[in-house]
Image (cartoon, rainbow, N blue to C red):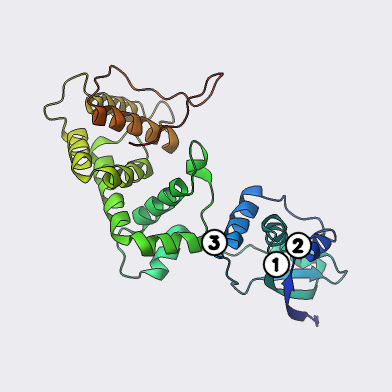
Amino acid sequence: MTQELITQTMTVDPDLAQEWLDTMAPNRNLRPARVAQFARAMREDRWYSTGDTVKFDTAGRLVDGQHRLQAIISAGIPQTLIVVWGVQPPAIVEIDTNTPRFPSDVLKIYDPTLTNVTDVAAATAIIVRWVNGERGTTLRSAPVSRTQLRDFYATHKEDIIAAALGGKRVSRHTKGAPRQAFSLCHWLFAELDATDAEFFWDRLVDGVGLESSDPIYVLRELLRREAAAFKSHPGLTVDVATALMIKAWNAYRRGDTIRMLKYTRGGANPERYPEAA
């Protein structure tokens, strides 16, 4: 079958984006988080054309590009897009079915010499979320663009690698929490005081000289219980584990003694998410 396609590069402003969205054929549900990610990149001048096209079928209906167009409206900033008209209507089910590039793929392409790429990519992603202001459940779910991941890694490469390797070391010995949480806290604590952070992690691993009321001891025992019970319950999520580690760190830095660690994220009186100090 001969298919005549018309391709054009156009500057699309919010009004035109809305006009095109009004023509949209039945499509997958809009993902607000993806729109927010794209809009933020546009506002921060980090939106780059990848050659992906906005597509219309032979009836003039939009079949691909709703997230980009909605982001243009949200950001209020015109963008240059490649537009294709004349796609056969059945082709909509084949759009966006390629294998995605994961964070580890992005960093491996950017830095081919990088080892431990999976750990470093995971650490980079969660640190970027934190820097973006994500707390609580969004700390494990908020999208991070490939450009943001690459640029943040390029700027903070040595510190990120140190956090990833430190998180891996503690996770291997302590268990009980997601490795990403250890890596993020490695980053946060080292930024505040590298000497205190080194002591904190060493004692969390070996337990040497800790009293039962020491915040590091209480955290260590909590993580050991979580590791032992792992087969019977899902375990700590990355946001809860991070909150508990931050609370233990803050108590250690203040010189406090404690009897237990807890973080209440739901219910009638949810806690404010802790910040490392």
Q: Residue at x 44, y 36 (%)?
A: 239
User: Residue tagged by mark 1?
Assistant: 78
Q: Position of residue 85 (x, y in %)?
A: 80, 75
- Mark 1 burial class by Cα count in 10 Å: few <14, some 14-19, many 20+: some
Marks 1/2 in contact by CB < 8 Å: the verdict is: yes
Local secondary structure at mark 2: helix
* Mark nearer the viewer, 1 or 3: 1
In the figure, 82 relative to 239: above or below? Answer: below
Marks 1/3 in contact by CB < 8 Å: the verdict is: no
Q: Earlier in the sequence, mark 1 or mark 2?
A: 2
Q: CA distance from mark 1 to mark 2?
A: 6 Å
In the displayed structure, does residue 210 sit left or right of residue 249?
A: left
In the displayed structure, does residue 176 sit left or right of residue 268?
A: left
Q: Residue at x 53, y 47 (%)?
A: 142
Q: CA distance from mark 3 to mark 2?
A: 28 Å
Decide if residue 164 is in sight here: yes
Give the residue type at disc 3.
Answer: Pro
Local secondary structure at mark 3: loop
User: Residue tagged by mark 2?
Assistant: 14
User: Toward the viewer: 19 or 95?
Assistant: 19
In the figure, 50 relative to 133: above or below? Answer: below
Give the residue type at disc 2.
Answer: Pro
In the displayed image of the protein, which residue is found farthest to the right?
59
Q: Position of residue 83 (x, y in %)?
A: 74, 74
Q: Residue at x 63, y 57 (%)?
A: 39
In the displayed structure, does residue 137 sit left or right of residue 253?
A: right
- Mark 2 burial class by Cα count in 10 Å: few <14, some 14-19, many 20+: some
Decide if residue 105 is in sight here: no
Give the residue type at disc 1.
Answer: Pro
User: Residue tagged by mark 3?
Assistant: 100
Q: CA distance from mark 1 to mark 3?
A: 26 Å
Local secondary structure at mark 1: loop
